[in-house]
């Protein structure tokens, strides 16, 4: 899939949007993703996020072999990504080892934060920016040699003042754009990472379309993805959750020490899942 | 960098004791010792003499006055949890900080832990990790890392000039570990990749980022706080690492590599290094089993290879040497089967023979699955 064709689909999506608006529909309806060759599977295993593992195959091997970890968060890009990978061979190596990948896109943050890269407080603009980020992430998947069919992609949206209604509205619009664009065929699975309470995650359940899955940060040390503060147990129940249950700390495996965040999954990873039973469900 | 003298950051800490009741049998070198005094994972530890030391865990502060043969919980009333930090400047003055429901609780003692006085720092941000340090009984700093994903590094800084009775909010350029030198200058090592070092001479009002000059022209993977005028850094060399020992001649504005130790495996975090008052440096190999001790006069950019150190575990995160005695706090994971029956073993080990052999003082096994 070329960048051009992706842009074409974006424009086509916009045309559809205008048509829907003209028909005074209250919400934006998006055609469901066309089933395609699966590039994901459901993991119920443990994982890690770590900048210190990016682009370093030897370290990734040290944290794979004879460890409890099945999944790895891979920063694939975005304007705020501090440690993105640009290496298709690194991604390929991870897949060869057996890792389930959680692709993370770190773009602009909420307008009421102090991050250097922020999206607009105007909901229309934020929606378009969400779409643009989805397009950019899609293109990055391709450049990394990854399949795009149903591939899960996670937007990293850090904490913001969710009591600021304008900021929350902008974030909801941004995530709606992100999700909607990723659903354009060949669709990807749209995920959102953030503080389970302070990134508005629970609010996105009422988006249309809602994100396909969430990656909630709730550093309570409890591995169960069902137990996630501020997230209703009735939302994202169908293998649609990753949980980051512990924040940055150093771990040593096979003599290699890296600072990691700890995750537990009951949700999609790339390219295949697992049958682990590690207390995540 | 003489003003950094006596501002040892992570290990060389004076310590007050509570009592010596509840004696345990003496421990033979090489044998697992007291294993039931830790009820949770240890977070930090410090040793000041060959007798005195402290251990901070997620639910306790343990003190020893006999080199680790016995430990006692001190009755400090701060919340349990992983967001905790401790620091002692001498045998009398110590601080324990912990995240609570209404902010950061900071307990301070001026009588060696016999009594504690509490204060609270109100916070708005969601805090994940704390680091606290003092240079004397009055001047200190605390850094509170905000909860973010791994792609960001945000923190709040608080400084005190009255021993922690009150705290003034400042700014922090990144999240990380904090130190205060004898001139009152605050040092902060951290960042997303852990490879940044900053200093502030005005209580966090403004910061200067340190520059590094490594022997190979490269950049550090991770940076530790300055200790007795030495900054240690990790430099990746493929499947191994080099620990660069850097010194400064311009008051910490820039740091040049003047010594190095080559370790057996790679590491992406700040090295476990102890810098003694005589400026001799001890470096634990992250793979375990090896330790390098480098006298100040012998420091050279020709990297030293660590010598065997029997009983020194892998994954040492904190180390302090006092003469021929020393402590190391380590944690390392292992699995009995493929992705099954995995544990992280946390251990505090001690040496009395200059690092040649180490014996276990405390152990906590964390089951992961």
Image (spheres, coloured by chain):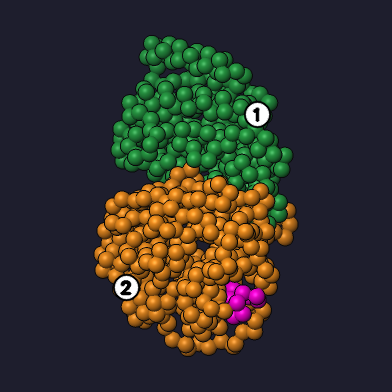
Chain colours: A green, B orange
Closest to the observer, B333 or A20? B333
Residue A80, how many percent across, how many down?
Answer: 45, 36
Q: Which residues are magenta?
A: B347-358
Residue B107, how many percent across, how many down?
Answer: 34, 70
Please indicate, yes or no, whether residue A176 appears anywhere in the rendered image: no
Residue A222, how many percent across, how many down?
Answer: 52, 55
Residue B85: quadrant of the picture: bottom left
Element at label 2: loop
Q: Is residue A23 left or right of residue A33?
A: left
Q: Which residue is mark 2?
A: B137
Label 2 resides on the chain identified as B
Q: Is residue A155 magenta?
A: no
Q: How many marks?
A: 2
The reply to whether dot 1 and dot 2 touch (C-beta < 8 Å) is: no
Do the residues marked 1 and 2 share a common chain? no
Element at label 1: loop
Q: Which mark is residue A145?
A: 1
Label 1 resides on the chain identified as A
The residue at 49%/55% (across/down) is: B256
The residue at 33%/55% (across/down) is: B200
């Amino acid at each position: 899939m070329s960048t051009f064709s992706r842009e074409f689909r974006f424009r086509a999506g916009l045309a559809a949007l205008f048509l829907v608006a003209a028909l005074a529909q209250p919400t934006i309806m998006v055609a469901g993703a066309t089933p395609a060759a699966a590039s994901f599977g459901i993991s119920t295993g443990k994982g890690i996020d770590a900048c210190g593992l990016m682009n370093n195959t030897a370290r990734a091997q040290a944290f794979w072999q004879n460890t409890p970890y099945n999944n790895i968060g891979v920063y694939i890009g975005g304007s705020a990504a501090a440690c993105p990978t640009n290496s298709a061979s690194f991604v390929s190596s991870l897949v060869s080892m057996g890792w389930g990948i959680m692709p993370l896109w770190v773009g602009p943050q909420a307008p009421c934060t102090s991050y250097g890269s922020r999206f607009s407080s105007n909901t229309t603009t934020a929606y378009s920016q969400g779409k643009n980020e989805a397009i950019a992430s899609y293109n990055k998947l391709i450049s990394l040699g990854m399949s795009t069919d149903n591939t899960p992609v996670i937007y990293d949206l850090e904490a913001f003042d969710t009591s600021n209604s304008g900021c929350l509205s902008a974030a909801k619009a941004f995530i709606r754009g992100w999700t909607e664009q990723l659903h354009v065929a060949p669709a990807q699975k749209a995920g959102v990472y953030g503080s389970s309470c302070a990134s508005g995650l629970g609010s996105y359940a009422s988006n249309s379309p809602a994100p396909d899955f969430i990656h909630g940060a709730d550093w309570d040390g409890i591995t169960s993805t069902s137990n996630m503060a501020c997230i209703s147990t009735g939302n994202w129940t169908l293998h649609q959750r990753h949980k980051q249950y512990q924040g940055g700390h150093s771990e040593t495996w096979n003599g290699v020490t890296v600072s990691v965040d700890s995750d537990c999954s009951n949700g999609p990873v790339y390219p295949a899942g697992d049958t682990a039973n590690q207390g995540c469900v | 960098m003489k003003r950094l003298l006596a501002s040892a950051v992570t290990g060389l800490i004076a310590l007050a004791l509570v009592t010596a009741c509840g004696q345990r049998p003496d421990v033979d070198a090489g044998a697992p010792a007291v294993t039931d005094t830790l009820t949770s994972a240890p977070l930090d530890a410090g040793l000041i003499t060959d007798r005195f030391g402290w251990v901070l865990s997620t639910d306790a502060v343990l003190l020893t006055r006999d080199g680790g043969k016995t430990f006692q919980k001190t009755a400090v009333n701060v919340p349990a949890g992983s967001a905790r930090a401790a620091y002692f400047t001498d045998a009398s003055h110590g601080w324990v900080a912990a995240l609570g429901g209404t902010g950061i609780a900071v307990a301070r003692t001026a009588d060696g832990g016999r009594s504690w006085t509490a204060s609270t720092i109100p916070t708005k941000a969601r805090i994940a990790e704390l680091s606290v340090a003092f240079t004397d009984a009055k001047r200190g700093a605390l850094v509170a890392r905000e909860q973010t994903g791994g792609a960001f590094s945000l923190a709040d800084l608080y400084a005190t000039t009255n021993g922690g009775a009150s705290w003034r909010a400042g700014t922090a350029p990144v999240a990380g570990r904090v130190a205060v030198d004898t001139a009152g200058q605050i040092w902060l090592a951290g960042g997303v990749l852990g490879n940044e070092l900053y200093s502030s001479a005005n209580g966090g009002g403004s910061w200067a980022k340190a520059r590094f000059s490594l022997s190979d022209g490269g950049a550090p993977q991770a940076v530790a706080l300055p200790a007795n005028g030495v900054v240690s850094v990790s430099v990746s060399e493929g499947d191994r690492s080099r620990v660069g020992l850097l010194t400064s001649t311009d008051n910490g504005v820039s740091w040049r590599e003047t010594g190095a130790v080559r370790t057996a495996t790679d590491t992406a975090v700040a090295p476990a290094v102890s810098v003694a008052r005589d400026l001799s440096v001890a470096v634990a190999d992250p793979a375990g089993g090896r330790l390098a001790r480098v006298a100040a006069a012998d420091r050279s950019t020709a990297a030293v290879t660590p010598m065997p150190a029997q009983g020194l575990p892998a994954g040492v995160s904190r180390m302090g040497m006092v003469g021929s005695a020393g402590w190391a706090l380590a944690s390392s994971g292992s699995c009995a089967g493929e992705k099954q029956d995995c544990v992280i073993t946390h251990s505090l080990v001690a040496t009395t023979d200059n690092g040649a052999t180490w014996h276990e003082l405390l152990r906590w096994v964390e089951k992961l699955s």
